Amino acid sequence: MITAENIASHELIGLRTEIVESTNSQIIGLNGTITDETKSMITINTINGTKMIAKSNNSWKFSIDNKDVVLNGSKISKRPFDRIGGRA
């Protein structure tokens, strides 16, 4: 089960997210549902279409159990199967 404490060790596909900090000011506030992820990129389905965003240059907000969790992209900049199972 995904909780606020262990989200960095879980699959992110299917979760809603929002970019709250970024080196690119144009994407702050971008939000949607994660449809895919690689080692360094997250694909988000937004109102304006699908966007591929780098993980490492951004801070990502997730809502888990009615709590907002903000993760620095460097904490999730691994291949999904390397993060799953607590190797974060």
Image: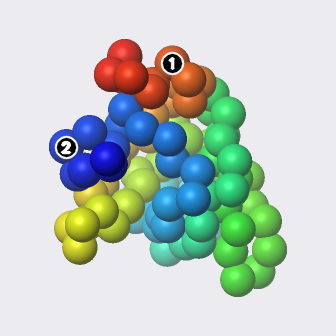
Q: Is residue 24 visible?
A: yes
Above or below: residue 7 compared with residue 86: below
Q: Position of residue 18 (x, y in %)?
A: 47, 67
Dot 2, crowdedness within 10 Å: few (<14), some or many (≥20)? few
User: What residue does disc 1 label?
Assistant: 82
Measuring 48% from the left and 54% from the top, which residue is drawn there? Answer: 22
Q: Secondary structure at mark 1?
A: helix
Instruction: Report how far apart the C-alphas of labels 1 and 2 lie in the structure.
Output: 18 Å
**What is the image's colouring?**
rainbow
Measuring 27% from the left and 57% from the top, which residue is drawn there? Answer: 69
The reply, left or right, for residue 33 in relation to residue 8 is: right
Q: Position of residue 65 (x, y in %)?
A: 24, 66
User: What residue does disc 2 label?
Assistant: 5
* Amino acid bearing label 2: Glu
Residue 6 lies in quadrant: top left
The reply, left or right, for residue 60 in relation to residue 24 is: left
The C terminus, quarter of image:
top left
Above or below: residue 34 compared with residue 1: below
Measuring 32% from the left and 47% from the top, which residue is drawn there? Answer: 1
